[in-house]
Image: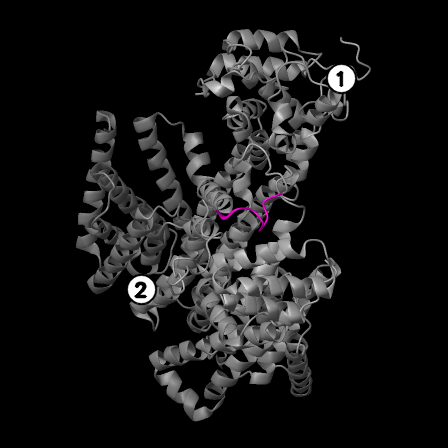
Amino acid sequence: MPTLATCLYVGALAAVALVVSVVSVANVAAPVDVAFFAALVFLAEQAKARVQSRAEGDLLASLASVIAVATYPVLGMWGAPVLLASLLVFRTTTPVVKRVYNVSQNVVCTFLGGVVYVGLGGDVGAVDASDFPYILVPITAANLVWHLANYALLAGVLRLDMGAGPLRVWRSLFAKTFGAFIGFSYLGFLMGVLWLGQLGPFAALFLLPPLFVANWAFAQYGAEQKAHQATLQALAQAIETKDLYTRGHGERVSKAATMLGAEMGWDGARLEALAQAGLLHDVGKIGVPTRILQKDGRLSEDEYDAIKLHPLHGVEVVGDIAFLEDARAGIMHHHERYDGTGYPSGLRGADIPIFARVLAISDAFDCMTSLRSYRPARPVEEALQELIRCRGTHFDPDLVDLFVSVIRRDGWTPARVPHVPSAQATAPAYDHDDPTHPPQVEERSGESS
Amino acid sequence: MSGSSLASIRSPSLFDGSAVVVACASVLTVTAVAQTAVRGLVAPMVAVTFGCLIAVGEVVRLRLPDDRVQAPIGLAAALGYALLSHLPHEGRAAHTVLQTVAVTSVGMLVGALPHALAGRATELEGIARRVIVVAGVAAVFRPFVLADDWYAWLDAHPPSCVVLTVLAVLVAWPLEAVLAAGVEASRHAGPFLALLRNELVAFFGIGAAIASTGVLIPLATWEVGLWALPLVIIPLLLAQFAYRRYARIRRTQVQTIRALSRATEVGGYTETGHARRVTELALAIGRELGLSERRLRHLQYAALMHDVGQLSLTDPIPGGATVLLAPEERRRIATLGAEVARKAAMPEEVARIVEAQAEPYRRPHLWEDSSVPLESRIIKVVNAYDDLVGTATTEDARLEALEGLRLGMAYEYDPQVVAALARVLSRSNLIPR
């Protein structure tokens, strides 16, 4: 339920939109064109509602802004009321407050853009070759104003409604698509120009295909990205059937690594690659016989060697998946130790790839805070103390400090206690990730250590 | 250009369709350039502007999610040039069909240069097809503009001009499809009609955006001159950008599914290379049977996934999960595999194909069981074939394996699929593997 402040904000915006609409209707010169534009808005919004109801992902272009820009050369600054047509869209699941907000915002943005267009000397009623290239100035300005006003209004309402900061709104909603929005708006301008020429409202027919196709591809991209994430998770889960205790381990390591990565100021593709590396870091266990993974107590040296191979198996499985080289290096070296006593390569200090140093900490942390057959789960604080104890020997000291501070600040939800069938519970398994229980390996010569 | 990732098994060609297309386009180009050189360029500024745009479009061509290579901006600009009727200052756009071809092919070849210099494929066949398509559209449309009485009539009736432009651009659709399908058919990629259908369907996507941009260019140029070009191209550029990202994530998805199937190999559940071989052969049979590209893609995913169900078993089955395993066991692996496919958010069709891969194609005393998808029957046959042939590489081993499958044709294996397998094997050089 929206707060009172949100309702007041939306109400005020709606009142402004209403005034703008009334004044515009009184001034507009071409009522027939208004009707056609309104019909177009209705059709576009109806189509959008249908696409969204099928949840095919986000849209690249806001059709409202394209049509809004199209009204400028035809109707000048008085075209804003055509956006009201989206109120007629039926069978939408959007709540009333949100719909009122969306419509009011579109009307106000369109009006502001129109004022800028006309104010800078944009032609209304007839555009021909002699107007170029100067006319690109008012239309570009109008375009920018439309979208910046849209951003400002949205940042305002999200601040009130969810307490979201303006920077976060920009990053999550505008940063990726702002350029595309502006680009598509030129298409709207062209539509207006052709509308004034021989084509009239039919201009829309020729402009919709590129818009539609781009939107379709963008929505497919979103859907496919979700599918890809699910496939990665399925790949990560494939190994978890081998040991019920490690269920969800990949996802939690991924989460912890992402927290640490974000704390280091990483973002975008790099953070995503880190998340995927965390998810898949143990995938190579598929190549280790279950018998060894679940073995009780002491391992023979051969068995320990088999376990030590799992980072290499992991790289083999991941193979040609097109993620960053860093992620592969992270999987390969997540069992290296800072003092050079880890495996598979015995790298030391800064020679260990940064992804691997991050994964090593996240991996050990999740292991310690999860239940194992041979010990209970440890409290978060105790696990952090253990990390601090091993800083410089096992882990990168600087990263440990960062990790401890981010976990203390943001908190951590440890693994839920798994439902382990009693038959399995009686078969204690050694966990190679556990820094507090170093592997008991028998010497090949037979001497016990 | 079509479906190269779905097409690893290629057979020796009847004739080289690609070479024929390139040869035709070369003859066209040489004639057009020679004639234009002799007569001089009509409206040189316009020609150079369009030529540059075509070249840029060729530089930024992209690989679509279905692995076709397309140059949306280059093709749209070339179509727009072919369909140009009016210019705001000059009046009639008086360039001939051959000048259109000359500007198009020179622009495209110049645009292909950076690709060649960077050591990438020049995709000459794609360029040749685009040149022929543009020549076809120009041959239909330009005579109307060049004939004085027709031009006067079009000038007086702008709506008729728009309709004529749309009709002319629609020539590009079947023309491109016939050329592409012809080349593919000459490579034995499947029956011509099925390939033609695939190519016609592939138009709905970026093809529609290219065609409508091709129509918009002359209309907008008529209104506002060459300044219209950047405005018209921006949306296509954005569409191209969206497609590029979509294509990239699709390729990554296939790689991830391959990783899943590789996990069964690393884990010792299946023999190395089994999933890859089954997938390649299954796709070859799918094409032979004329499946649509959508179904081929699902077949590819399902074939890669067909043994993934074993990952849900704690340890590999001793001796491997081969055709020799009991039917119940195979069915269980199929069910588990379908579960993984659903968990991995693959299309429901993929899960269903994996699920039914162990089912016989019909039951005793019943007609064919239509609930078993054709794709499942293909995987069943190919899987059994690969198990029977094993690592043997001789002609005899192949024939023996085929004979084994034919013995099971009464109930186990779909005779239609076995026959397609025999045809694919008979003309391919699958040995040595």
Q: Which residue is mark 1?
A: A341
The image position of residue A272, as x and y in percent, is 55, 34
> Is A183 placed left or right of B102 in the picture?
left
Whichever of labels 2 and 1 marks the residue nearer the N terminus, that label is 2
State the quadrant of the C terminus of chain B. bottom right
The image position of residue B328, as x and y in percent, is 47, 45
Highlighted magenta segment, given as a residue range: B320-327
**Residue flagged by tag 1: what amino acid is it?**
Thr
The residue that appears at 59% across and 72% down in the rendered structure is B184
* Residue A137 appears in the figure: no
The answer to whether A357 is drawn above or below residue B401 in the figure is above
Q: Residues within 10 Å of mark 1 (few under 14, many from 20)?
A: some
The residue that appears at 35% across and 46% down in the rendered structure is A55
Do the numbered discs 2 and 1 sit on residues whose CB atoms are within 8 Å?
A: no
Which of these two is toward me, B181 or A43? B181
The answer to whether A323 is drawn above or below residue B21 in the figure is above
* Residue B370 appears in the figure: yes
Question: In which chain is the residue bearing label 1?
Answer: A
The image position of residue A317, as x and y in percent, is 64, 39
Q: Which residue is mark 2?
A: A125
> Is B38 placed left or right of A68 in the picture?
right
**Residue flagged by tag 2: what amino acid is it?**
Gly
> Is A221 placed left or right of B6 in the picture?
left
For the residues labelled 2 and 1, the Cα–Cα distance comes to 78 Å
Under circle 1, the secondary element is loop
